[in-house]
Image (tube, rainbow, N blue to C red):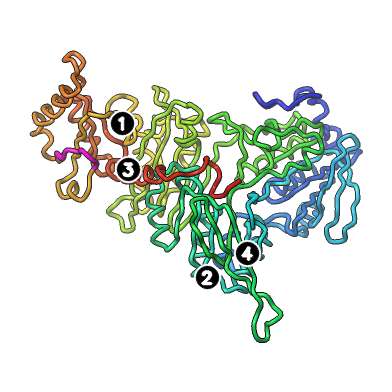
Amino acid sequence: PLSGTTPPAPSSCDQRESKMDIMSTKARPDNDGEKKTKKEKILIIGGVAGGAAAAARARRMSETAEIVMVDRGPYVSFASCALAYYVGDVIKDERKMLVASPQKFRGRFEIEVRVRSEALSIDTKKKMVEIKNLQTGATYSESYDALLLAPGASPFRPPIPGIDAPGVFCLRSIPDSRHVRDWIEKNNVKHATVVGGGFIGLESAENLRRRGINVTLIEGGDHVMGPIDGEMLYRVNNKIKEEGVEMIVGDILTEIRYEEEEGEGSDAKAKRHLPLKLRTRKGIHIDTDLVIMSVGIRPETKLAKMAGVALGKRGGILIDDQCRTNVDSVWACGDACETKNWISGEYGILALAGPASRQGRIAADSMILGDKSKLRYRGSQGTFVCGAFGFTIAGTGINEATAKRLGIAYDSVTTHPAQHVSYYPGAKMMDLKVLFDPTDEGRILGAQCVGEEGAERRIDIIAAFIQKRGTVFDLEEAELCYAPQYGAARDPVDMVGFVAANSIRGDSPLAHWDQLEKGVPLIDVREIHEYTKGSAPGAINIPLNTLRERLGEVMKIVDAADEKKNTPGAEKRRRVYVTCHVGQRGHYATRALRLNGFDARNVSGGYRSYMAYQQQENNKKKQHPEPGTCGVES
């Protein structure tokens, strides 16, 4: 059963072990090829990632089971991640987004798929599901031996005035994207507003700009892409503005007003759509021709709730590590379920195709093999990637905001390496941040990377280490492939491990811009021409090449700071912070100072990270609603 969130009585998953094996060894061909005597039936409600994966896996595990999959939409398996690119005309033929058709499931797997068929209710005692054919309106009952709920999630439409006005859309299905394209073409859209700056919001904004449409992006939090810590988006924010997108953060949409006017001439009887008039909480007024709402999802659990399936605190279906619910012979997978983040231990709704597909696979084995199944779902670490405005934004594990909220002890390191050696043409800077346990254990808690090239590769590597409960010391020893056009002899993954490990060992302790102790001197070891272009307030410029000959000067600066704070002689720490452009020269200076008796600490990420922190601090100063509102009033 779920630890800490065990579904309620009448029975726990452990008490149902014997009942879960709905297809016993007698019901399947054994090693001698014995034929089953009773044809067991699996009914799957919902397709796409979870349901479709379960159906195909179930067939691979049993040649004799009857498998039926129903979905209320017109397509049972499609690439939902491609929708914004269809809107942007990157993908020109919507058929390219279809992953598998009912005909393919029938021909390849002998699975019956019924689209435009909606499950209305479940009788768990009789093991019957009432289904409505949405084309004919007829209803009928379908039996099952094992039932898998994979209904997914629906876009959240906040209850604000005008939310159902023509021209207001969500992007969740192929018909949704088709409707947006049609609206753009029929109404000669010149301006669009995207509400919510998550995955779909950023992809929508980018693709609308690709079509030459002016875009306003409204985000309720202090930065877009909530899973990423705000300072990591410094270059992304600048690029969004460079691309002509008006970005409003710290504000929410409160009203949509819609009007029509009579047509003229031959279209006198037709009505023409006037621009939608939007208003935000801060009183900003926006005239727009199109609104795309991308403010999150809500799990589709109405059917499950009616059937007595237990839900969690976030409103999702509770499942155990075999994707079983608290109701006998009922499994669940995908976006409708609450998923455990195995790093933080927190449950939440995770709308990612990879975890949904794995859950479907595990559910299929459990339905076929029961407790003989060896597959278990350990939870998720939330590995993701998003492409927007020429940047790749990727992450895995927990971020700094989550660690603070849950009281998890952590430290972090930020580096700014190129994706491959600088002497090979095309080197481009990445911003890489890793969170880790600050104790001697050094376990990796999460990572984020933003860059034009190479970001997703580094996150995939670190995600694999996290999955094996790896440490920053493991990153130090990572042996990765190298050629000049692909990386470096010491890859950015190795380098971030070196920096974190050096900090834990005390060789080169880290400091952070938002945690600097007041009154402690800050030495900037960049060259004078770099320093004069911009520096952190109060930073004293002593270039690295002159540092050793100016140690006496540093001593006077540090002693003066201690005297100013009236620090007793016995307690003088000779603490000093060191910074450079990205952290490398700061490390060299920190080592030199520590070997000369100073308590020197290298400020992670250098001046480049300082500029990013300043941008984020300015965003935080703007009044904004509670986290998670994504730019709408709920």
Magenta includes 540?
yes
User: Which of the two discs, 1 and 2, sits closer to the camera?
Assistant: 2
Classified by dominant secondary structure, the portion drawn in magenta counts as: loop
Mark 1 secondary-structure assignment: strand
Confirm or deny contact between disc 1 and disc 2 (CB under 8 A). Answer: no
- Please identify the quadrant where the N terminus is shown: top right
Is residue 318 visible to the viewer in this orientation of the structure?
yes
For the residues labelled 2 and 3, the Cα–Cα distance comes to 37 Å
Q: Position of residue 190 (x, y in %)?
A: 52, 70
Give the camera-side residue of 321 and 572: 572
Query: Sequence order check: which comes first, mark 3 or mark 4?
Result: 4
On residue 190, the disc is 2
| Residue shown at the point (13%, 40%) measured from the top left | 545
User: Which of the two discs, 3 and 1, sits closer to the camera?
Assistant: 3
Mark 3 secondary-structure assignment: helix
On residue 609, the disc is 3
Give the camera-side residue of 283 and 215: 283
User: Which of the two discs, 1 and 4, sits closer to the camera?
Assistant: 4
Placement of 251 over or under 525, stated as above or below = below
Label 1 sits on residue: 510
Q: Position of residue 204 (x, y in %)?
A: 54, 59
Is residue 96 visible to the viewer in this orientation of the structure?
no
Q: Position of residue 415 (x, y in %)?
A: 34, 41
Q: Residues within 10 Å of mark 4 (few under 14, many from 20)?
A: some
Label 4 sits on residue: 258
For the residues labelled 3 and 1, the Cα–Cα distance comes to 13 Å
Q: Which residues are magenta?
A: 536-542
Give the camera-side residue of 115 and 468: 115
| Residue shown at the point (44%, 41%) measured from the top left | 229
User: For the residue marked with disc 4, what is the amino acid?
Assistant: Tyr
